[in-house]
Image (tube, helix red, strand yellow):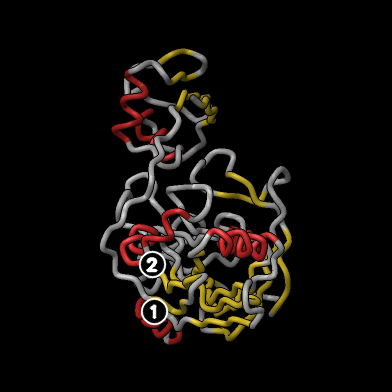
Amino acid sequence: MERIALTVAAGDPRRLDQYLAGAVPGLSRSAAQRLIRDGSVQVNQAVVTRPAELLSSGDSVSALLPEPAKGRAVPAAVDLSIAYEDEWLIIVDKPAGLPVHPGAGHRADTLINGLLAIRPQIGSVGPDPERPGIVHRLDKDTSGLIVVAKTPEAFERLADIVKGRTILRRYTVLVWGRVTPEGGIIDAPIGRHPRRRQEQAITASGRPARTGYRVLRYLPTTSLLLCTLQTGRMHQIRVHLAAMGYPVVGDVAYGRKGFGLKRQFLHASYLAFDHPFTGERLETESPLPADLRAALHLAEEAS
């Protein structure tokens, strides 16, 4: 069991069950209601058992959460686009909306479920049976290239490449505003947001995070960027660019919608590293998917 402590901020949902569901990653509203009715939630150090209890800004909320149940990922039919494959590894061009691995609300509709259906040997690769072969990740609504290990030895070597930061990961990004300077490195630590638990933030207690960027071209109200990850923190590019004052177009968590997008304009367009077995330089590129091309066309014509 894990106890979490939260502080209600202005603008947060007032109902206790709604607040918990929004503040705790992977917790549904029905699960939050069960926790409350079971006496596992306190408001201002007093147990509350009414899911409809109203909160005020500044209230302290704590909850005793059960450990999430884990199991082995199962094969399932998922449409996947393979950008590269050999006997050791596979690079998938992931569409937006597809989670990388099973989690809350997604048990059999993820990239890993799809890979297990066509490459079942991946199921025994790595220490986590829910995330076999995974050495780095992409957000569900971020499209583009991700590499997955097919053998235990490949997993170890690819994990070392990612940890040693010798893998080159570039993202094509559209942001609001005219970015200045035209290139540079954003160096700011990132950790969990102190109030909005599903988000990240720049915080002194966070882990080191560095993002390189350069402007590809300026559009009337936006800038098209190429960003390079020098570290791999959750939501890193989105948090860093928003902190600069140039949030990613379509990012409802750290910015705002635009140009008809239903997700953030963030695409993992380039992946390169020295092959862990052959030593040859492996480079893979992914073109912008249709929704981002359409949004970019609208951005070019904006006034």
Give residue 71's quadrant in the image. top left
Residue placed under numbered mark 2 in the picture: 96
Q: Secondary structure at mark 1?
A: loop
Q: Is residue 180 left or right of residue 254?
A: right
Q: Is residue 214 above or below residue 38?
A: below
Give residue 165's quadrant in the image. bottom right
Residue 9: percent from left, percent from top: 51, 36
Q: Judge by depth and name the residue closer to the eye, 138 or 40.
A: 138
Residue drawn at x 31%, y 27% is 33
Q: Is residue 288 above or below residue 91?
A: below
Residue drawn at x 50%, y 58% is 134
Q: Quarter holding the C terminus?
A: bottom left
Residue placed under numbered mark 1 in the picture: 289
Q: Is residue 128 above or below residue 265?
A: above
Report whether residue 148 is seen: yes
Q: Disc 2 vs disc 1: Cβ atoms closer than 8 Å? A: yes
Q: Secondary structure at mark 2?
A: loop
Report whether residue 303 is seen: no
